[in-house]
Amino acid sequence: MIKMRNLTRVAVLSAFMAASAGAVAANWWPIVANETMPDGSIKQIEYVPLEKASQVWPICISYPHLKDPFFLAANYGSVNEAKRLGVKIQTLDAGGYTQLNTQISQIEDCVAGGAKAVIMVGVAADGMGNLLRSLAQKNVVVIDAVNGVKSDDVAARVLTNPREEAYNTGKYLAEKHPAGSPKVRVGWLPGPAGAGFVEAFSAGFHEGIKGSAVEIVETKYGDVGKEVQARLVEDMIQTHKDLDYIVGTAVMAEAAVPLLKSRRLDDKIKLVSVYTTPGVYQHLKRGSIEAAGVAPVVDTASLALDMAVRMLEAKEKQPIRVINTTSKVYTKDTIGNVDINGTLAPADFRPVFSYDGK
């Protein structure tokens, strides 16, 4: 068993493993994705994974937290892919986006315990350089997953492309409210300041609304917990009495639905989420959230684990592979077209913190 500190939840939540893992999901491949080539060009590919791992590789998967359905969906995809490939995984929960040192120490302990690869969803874009340099020197394969970090000491990147997700969201609003039409005022709540995905969200959203009638009146940052996001929404609607939209994370959108309804603002202020959770999915179908981006989070996590095994079994060092899965914006009228199995975990799924590869 891989040795770790700062993981008081593991002993309790590992008990969920047998009931939660369930049967291996249906094939998730081929998945259409964009791969950035060594010369910087982008090529659309159909990714097909390995049939099986050649041995039971021990792999650690590090998340900022497992308190929202986004990372629960990623955990679900990783567990199913570990079962299919026949590899051993240990899941690490850093405890939140303020816990950079915890994430680093968990990964260090995991590698000290024998892990040959680490799939890391970074707490922050910066701050991982020394750790990643050390892991590279030890020939530990690192997959930079989902959020993205500013270091080239990784074997590959498998990202959900948060910039594209937010760009698509911004573009959706820009097309509804083009230049020359009446101005619309937007509150922007992208998540915790400094996180790599938040920087990407903000860059993409600003680019998407460029040249339109969409105006961001205020940006508020905060942890992606419901209480924090609800408080930010409350502050936003108190400060700005003429908002047309509040746009941001799925946690924000879920928290905002009852808030706006209780204040009888649900007909005045529309909600748009950059990505989708089960709650957002249900609100989309009901129309209480106007639009949301949908990315294949489950499939992306499966791809990241396959990539880790692929890199472990490579006979020689390869250039860094950069693969981005793609997303689209959906509304009440189109959400029925989504293959939800590649996006969300089943409703009864609980976190799985270890799988022994058997």
Image: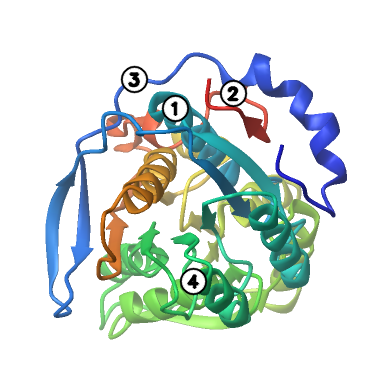
How many other residues sit within 10 Å of disc 2, few (<14), some (14-19) or many (≥20)?
few
Does the CB distance between marks 4 and 2 fall below 8 Å?
no
User: Looking at the image, is mark 1 or mark 3 earlier in the sequence?
Assistant: 3
Front of the two marks 4 and 2? 4
* Mark 1 and mark 3: Cα distance apart in space: 16 Å
User: Which one is earlier in the sequence, the residue at label 1 or at label 4?
Assistant: 1
Q: Secondary structure at mark 3?
A: loop
Looking at the image, which residue is at 31% across and 83% down? 210
> Which residue is found at the position 34% from the left and 20% from the top?
26
Q: Amino acid at mark 1?
A: Gly
Q: CA distance from mark 4 to mark 2?
A: 38 Å
**Label at residue 136:** 4
> Would you name the residue on which mark 3 appears?
26
Q: Which quarter of the figure has residue 47?
A: top left
- N-terminal of the pair, mark 4 or mark 2, is 4
Among numbered discs 3 and 4, the one appearing first in the sequence: 3
SS at mark 1 in the image = loop
- The amino acid type, in three-letter code, at marker 2 is Ala
Provide the residue designation for mark 1. Answer: 86
Camera sees residue 246: yes
**Residue, disc 2:** 347
- The part of the image, by quadrant, that contains residue 194 is bottom right
Q: Amino acid at mark 4?
A: Ala
> Closer to the camera, 69 or 282?
69
> Does 132 appear above or below 336?
below
Q: Position of residue 283 (x, y in %)?
A: 53, 38
- Residue at mark 2 to residue at mark 1: CA–CA distance: 25 Å
* Cα gap from disc 3 to disc 4, whole angstroms: 34 Å
